[in-house]
Image (tube, rainbow, N blue to C red):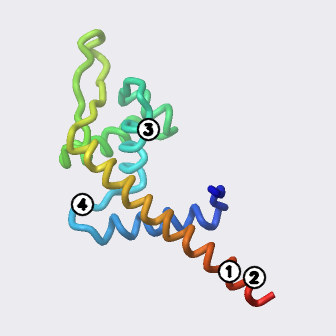
Amino acid sequence: MATTPNADQLVGIMRDTVVALVRRDGPDFSARQLGVFLTCYLQDDPHTVRGLAARLNVSKPAITRALDRLGELDLARRKVDPMDRRSVLVQRTLKGAAFLRDLRGIMGEAASGARKGSTETASRKTANS
């Protein structure tokens, strides 16, 4: 039976995920960079610098800095919109898709650990009653 994780479990999953990302070989991401990355990869509509800034409620220069870093890592790239040359489109990359797949795996492991921990806690409470 699947249960909905509570807020403490979700924060624990987030913590375990961030710790796993920090421990692995490779670059670290700021919260903003990760937010921009996840928005680009989890929402299918086309993304522009202006649109990301509006969606995340941050300035365009902040999005540009995050995209600079994601571009250095080949996790996203910018391309001039051929329909409106004033607009810049954000494109996904194969390396970015692979990173998202890895991130899903890390989060799945963290969620499994959280479920296991809550089951053990419930068992101890039942045994002590």
Given the image, on which type of amino acid does mark 1 rest?
Answer: Ser
Q: Nearer the viewer, mark 4 or mark 2?
A: 2
The residue at the point 27 percent across, 34 percent down is 92
* Position of residue 40 measured from the top left corner of the image (x, y, whole percent): 38, 36
CA distance separating discs 3 and 2: 51 Å
Decide which of tag 3 and tag 4 comes sooner along the chain: 4
Q: Residue furthest top?
A: 83
Q: Is residue 30 left or right of residue 79?
A: right
| Dot 1 and dot 2 residues touching (CB under 8 Å) | yes
Q: Residues within 10 Å of mark 1 (few under 14, many from 20)?
A: few
Residue 59: mark: 3
Decide which of tag 4 and tag 2 comes sooner along the chain: 4
CA distance separating discs 1 and 4: 39 Å
Residue on which disc 1 sits: 123
Decide which of tag 3 and tag 2 comes sooner along the chain: 3
Secondary structure of residue under mark 1:
helix
Residue 27: mark: 4
Q: Nearer the viewer, mark 3 or mark 4?
A: 4
CA distance separating discs 1 and 3: 48 Å
Indicate the quadrant where residue 26 lies: bottom left
- Which of 109/26 is in front? 109
Given the image, on which type of amino acid does mark 2 rest?
Answer: Thr
Given the image, on which type of amino acid does mark 3 rest?
Answer: Ser
Quarter the N terminus occupies: bottom right
